[in-house]
Amino acid sequence: MEGVRCISSSLIHASSTHNGADQRIELTPWDLRLLLLGPIQKGLLFRDAGISDGNTFVDTLKASFSRTLHHFPLLAGRLATAELDNETVSFFIDCNDAGALFVHAEADGVTISDILEPVYVPSIVHSFFPLSGLTNYDGISQPLLGVQVTKLADGVFVGCTINHSVVDGTSFWHFINSWSEISRGSIHLSKPPIFHRSFFDNKIKNSIRIPRSLVDKLQQDRFIPPPLLERVFHFSKQNIAKLKAKANAEVRGDNISSLQALLSHFWQSIIRNKELNPDDAKTFYLTVGARPRVHDVPEWYFGNAAKGAIITMKAKEVREQNVGDIALEMNKLVHAHTEELFKRDLESWIASPKFMTMGMMSTKLTGTSSSPRFDVYGNDFGWGKPIAVRSGSVNKSEGKLTVFCGAEDGSIDVEACLSAEALEAMANDDEFMDTVTM
């Protein structure tokens, strides 16, 4: 496969100023703790049926992109800091319409089959995303949002990168859903974003103070991942239902969800197929959303509204226990996240700020991101729905699992980032592969 060639690159501004928008939007602890990580990168693959002249469809996309920024003014802004007393600093989003990046590119000779047919995700996919190699902290000088539209020989890939200190997965897809909606001719959004941080009361209004010494370290921590491969495993609705039924039967209950059963099954295979000391402590990282659990956080709140949670077991426990026993621990962990726990976590972070780093993502940890609940395949920009979704190179480490809904109703795709040895061993694991749809 040949490389990606840039045709044009420009900054796109909002089509008009949003009268109801605040010029300054404070960052919350959910946002701030991510400053050292990279942005979110997700992209959609389309067939080129219905796409007319290449330059015309790109110009049309730019115009709808600009109109969408009118509704999401913070994405055309930049991160900013304010020096406070006692050697402290506050962070906020300056909605200054500095512009979002839009790149038009071509991948000469690259076909849809080149992307979808290999066992492992081809490395060229990472070239379909802009703003790689940055941390969220770099949003002080770099765009908070970047889009790259790459024309393939028989398709189009729309890759989107958004600063993770500005959005979580829910907000990321909220923007993409809104952009596709406007691209199809809508004037008003069906789900207008809510930017208010009212649930923080006066704490956020008075700005969260971060020690200057801690801020200085933000510019020093850069993570270089080891060589890893990615493979997308597809699970049909029927096979997921079987996993769920089996897991619930093993614990004589009915509380385990489809996703909890699937992730436990996946984690068990990863651990089973690695050479590990049986007494090694292994950790599984989950993200628990605040929107359905904190009543002051509205459904269409735009920003980060989630916290991490972990399960730790010895390697032999993960290997030897039933999938249902592991899934039940996940279920208990999620249900333990009450509104009171979320609020205590926020107050604790404000009192003693700590930043997540990619260095924390060691080989002892398997972690998930994204969700099968996000509307991925409903994003029609005017030439049909996508046929696949892929992620970029950012925030990848050994054991990273990215979960997407599948193209078929009720199915789930899991993009696993692991060593070549681990992925090869899993491919030869009949117990695991019997649940995978090829």
Image (cartoon, rainbow, N blue to C red):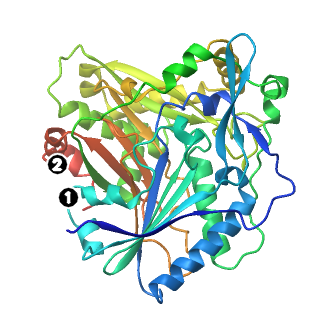
Looking at the picture, does residue 175 appear above or below residue 378? Answer: above
Please identify the residue farthest to the top as the structure is shown.
Answer: 86
Q: Position of residue 60 (x, y in %)?
A: 59, 79
- Tell me the kind of residue under disc 1: Val
Q: Is residue 333 visible?
A: yes
Screen quadrant of the N terminus: bottom left
- Which numbered disc, 2 or 1, marks the residue that appears first in the sequence? 1
Screen quadrant of the C terminus: bottom left
Q: Position of residue 347 (x, y in %)?
A: 70, 17
Nearer the observer, 331 or 278: 278
Nearer the observer, 385 or 36: 36
**Residue that label 2 marks:** 427
Residue at 43% across, 24% down: 220
Nearer the observer, 184 or 265: 184
Looking at the picture, does residue 113 appear above or below residue 294? Answer: below
Dot 2 and dot 1 residues touching (CB under 8 Å): yes
Whether residue 149 sits left or right of residue 416 in the image: it is: right
